[in-house]
Image: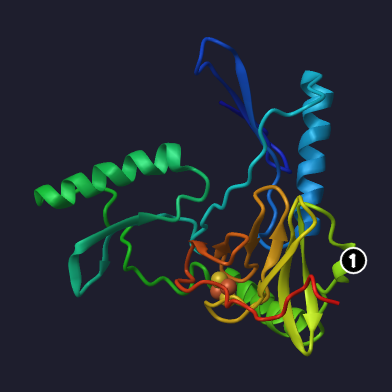
Amino acid sequence: MFISAGAPTRSFRTARPDGQDWLIAAGKEFKPGDPEQQRDAIADLRAWLLDCFGIQALSHLWTNEDFRPMDGVAFVGAATASQPDLLVATGFEAWGLTQGAVAADIIASTILGAEHPAADLLRANRVRPLAGGGTFVAENSKIAAHLVGDRLLRRKVVQVEDIGPGEGGIVSKKGEQLAVTRHQDGSLSAVSAVCTHLGCIVGWNATDRTWDCPCHGSRFDESGKVLTGPAVSPLAQHAWDPSAP
Ligand code: FES
């Protein structure tokens, strides 16, 4: 696997699943639920693949979320002090290939009752407020900005006529913000755009055709069903028939 030393981070590797050579490339980061940032990242990846490898058309395209602990170290081991048998491994910060192997080793040691030299460093129930303090404040400020800007200022809103086949957009209807999808046959469907975790407004992910939340990364399918938490409830169904005038 090759990874760029500078920013934006780009990486690639080859794969041979069926005797044929494939190139798997990853482009720069974007926040979930921000369609513009996502468009920009994908355009950048396409331009880079054309420039470096002469690749004109992609066979597959998808997005992925990487969870990033504030102090930069994964969470591995007992989820809470009161539940020592509930073991977790998360927050690999896009480095599951390496941190996942370390996590497996720690968890195996924990189950066997053996000490592991990295167990305390990656302890899942640690609290290190100073290590991630600046990031914590910055990220929560962004979440507050989404709650106010997206909800009250309705800054994501589009007109339903501007949503093309296979696309989604946030539409304001009678004071509510709705996540509206136009299907390939031209028909429309709508669910509430309010994330069921803590109430931020979701954004359309045109690559995966999902509704993604910019605040804590919950993802929902076109019908509002939860794909990824922390949300556990689907986006509320809405009675409005967007096909009606
Ligand atoms: S408000 Fe949507 S994930 Fe937290």
Q: Residue at x 82, y 25 (%)?
A: 50
Using the rendered view, name the quadrant where residue 203 is placed: bottom right
Q: In which quarter of the image is ligand 1?
A: bottom right
Q: In the picture provided, is 83 more to the left or to the right than 223? A: left
Residue 179 in percent (x, y) is at 70, 70
Q: Is mark 1 on a helix, strand or loop?
A: helix
Using the rendered view, name the quadrant where residue 5 is placed: top right
Q: Label 1 is placed on what type of residue?
A: Glu
**Residue 121 in view:** no
Q: In this picture, is 125 found above or below 192?
A: above
Pick whichever, 135 or 48, lies toward us. 48
Q: In this picture, is 86 found above or below 62?
A: below
Q: Which residue is drawn at 52% across and 68% down?
A: 132
Q: In the picture provided, is 54 more to the left or to the right than 107? A: right
Residue 234 in percent (x, y) is at 52, 71
Using the rendered view, name the quadrant where residue 148 is placed: bottom right
Mark 1 CB lies closer than 8 A to ligand 1: no
Residue 24 in percent (x, y) is at 62, 28
**Residue 141 in view:** yes
Pick whichever, 120 or 88, lies toward us. 88
Q: Mark 1 points at which residue?
A: 161
Residue 63 in percent (x, y) is at 63, 46
Q: Residue furthest top?
A: 19
Q: In the picture provided, is 143 more to the left or to the right than 34? A: left
Local crowd size for mark 1, using a 10 Å CA cut-off: few (<14), some (14–19), many (≥20)? few
Q: Which residue is drawn at 73% across and 29% down?
A: 58
Pick whichever, 46 or 17, lies toward us. 17
Q: Which residue is drawn at 67% across and 33% down?
A: 4
Q: In this picture, is 109 found above or below 130?
A: above
Q: In the picture provided, is 234 more to the left or to the right than 33? A: left
